[in-house]
Image: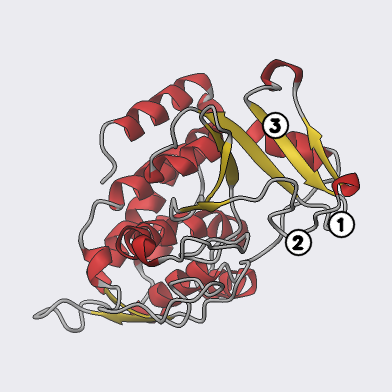
């Protein structure tokens, strides 16, 4: 559940950066939807077999309540439109179950081409659909993390998320010991991060690893870079880890680091670190068959 800290943190962001409201409003709606128990019910009773490189969601078949999924999607769009983002809620409201399921599946897979195709079918702006896609998948991915994180191998070594296969949004350097933990902005998961190694390509040549550090946050927030893949990763120094539902907010709080890295020519990998191959089925609630066309 989101708890009181999430809206408080979001409120601080909204006051400090009112221009972020078109993004922050649907993000708050997505985080509020994490508390809906129906997302956990969509997960298979048993996850696919665990190993030391395969994310827990890989190969899973998900059966979602169509009404709940549609309500969540329209809630995100309504929040975005109230904040001034032109998303065309009316067109999404007319989407059938197949399109809603395809949108969720493409969001989970971070399939940019599929999202553009869905936008075309629904006569929506592709940029708006692509921007909302991570939020569409967020409540379900948080449910998967809450249920399956305990089964992740303790020695998980890949740089991508052990739950949903995404690349880390950031890394936390924790406490006096400086333990490094990678954090997923989609599902809030955490896993070990390696010092002097690129999380994206595994490069360990320290001559090709670097850093960007704003003068005023040098000790608490910086960017680490890799010349081998041109990737960058945000590093945040903390005493205690951010709660899972706050990782996306921390990611937004540190967007100036993204801007600085991108302006300097560094990038982030597209798509997922590991393919998932999930299947999404949309099921109408009992007694409401045909509620979605």
Q: Quadrant of residue 102?
A: bottom left
User: Upstream in the sequence, badge 3 or badge 2?
Assistant: 2
> How far across and how far down the image is residue 252, in percent?
55, 37
Reading the image, the residue beneath label 3 is 222
Q: Which mark is residue 147?
A: none
Which residue is located at x 79 percent, y 44 percent?
225
Reading the image, the residue beneath label 1 is 228
Which residue is located at x 44 percent, y 76 percent?
50
Please say if 23 is above or below 279: above
Q: Residue furthest left?
A: 287
Q: Does residue 91 appear left or right of residue 287 in this picture?
A: right
From this viewpoint, is residue 100 visible? yes
Q: Residue furthest top?
A: 216
User: Upstream in the sequence, badge 1 or badge 3?
Assistant: 3
User: Badge 1, how many Cα within 10 Å: few under 14, some, many 20+?
Assistant: some
User: Badge 3, how many Cα within 10 Å: few under 14, some, many 20+?
Assistant: many
From this viewpoint, is residue 84 visible? no
> How far across and how far down the image is residue 55, in percent?
50, 71
Tell me if label 1 and label 2 are in contact, CB under 8 Å: yes
Tell me how many marks there are.
3
Q: Residue furthest front?
A: 177
Disc 2 on helix, strand or loop?
loop
Between 255 and 200, the one nearer to me in the picture: 200
> How far across and how far down the image is residue 210, in percent?
83, 40
Which residue is located at x 58 percent, y 72 percent?
120
- Quadrant (top left, top right, bottom left, bottom right) of the C terminus: bottom left
What separation in Å lies between label 1 and label 2 (alpha carbons)? Answer: 8 Å
User: Badge 2, how many Cα within 10 Å: few under 14, some, many 20+?
Assistant: some
Please say if 24 is above or below 184: above
What separation in Å lies between label 1 and label 3 (alpha carbons)? Answer: 19 Å
Tell me if label 1 and label 3 are in contact, CB under 8 Å: no
Reading the image, the residue beneath label 2 is 201
């Amino acid at each position: 559940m989101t708890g009181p800290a999430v809206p408080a943190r979001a409120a601080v962001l909204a006051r400090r950066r009112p221009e972020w409201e078109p993004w922050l409003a649907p993000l708050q709606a997505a985080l509020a939807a994490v508390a809906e128990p129906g997302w956990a019910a969509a997960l298979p009773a048993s996850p696919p077999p665990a190993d030391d490189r395969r994310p827990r969601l890989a190969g899973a078949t998900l059966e979602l309540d169509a009404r709940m999924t549609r309500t969540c999607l329209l809630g995100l769009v309504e929040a975005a439109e109230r904040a001034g983002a032109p998303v065309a809620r009316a067109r999404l409201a007319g989407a059938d179950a197949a399109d809603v399921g395809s949108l969720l599946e493409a969001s989970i897979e971070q399939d940019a081409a599929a999202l553009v195709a869905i936008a075309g079918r629904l006569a929506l702006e592709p940029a708006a659909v692509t921007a909302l896609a991570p939020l569409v998948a967020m409540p379900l991915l948080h449910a998967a993390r809450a249920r399956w994180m305990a089964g992740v191998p303790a020695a998980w070594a890949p740089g991508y998320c052990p739950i949903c296969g995404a690349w880390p949004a950031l890394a936390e350097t924790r406490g006096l010991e400086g333990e490094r933990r990678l954090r997923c902005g989609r599902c809030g998961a955490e896993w070990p991060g390696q010092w002097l190694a690129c999380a994206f390509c595994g490069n360990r040549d320290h001559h090709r690893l670097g850093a960007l550090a704003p003068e005023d946050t040098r000790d608490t927030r910086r960017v680490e870079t890799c010349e081998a893949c041109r990737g960058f990763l945000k590093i945040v120094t903390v005493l205690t880890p951010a709660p899972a539902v706050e990782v996306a907010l921390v990611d937004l709080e540190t967007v100036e680091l993204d801007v600085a890295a991108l302006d300097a020519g560094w990038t982030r990998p597209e798509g997922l670190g590991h393919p998932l191959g999930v299947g999404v089925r949309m099921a109408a609630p009992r007694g409401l068959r045909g509620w979605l066309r």
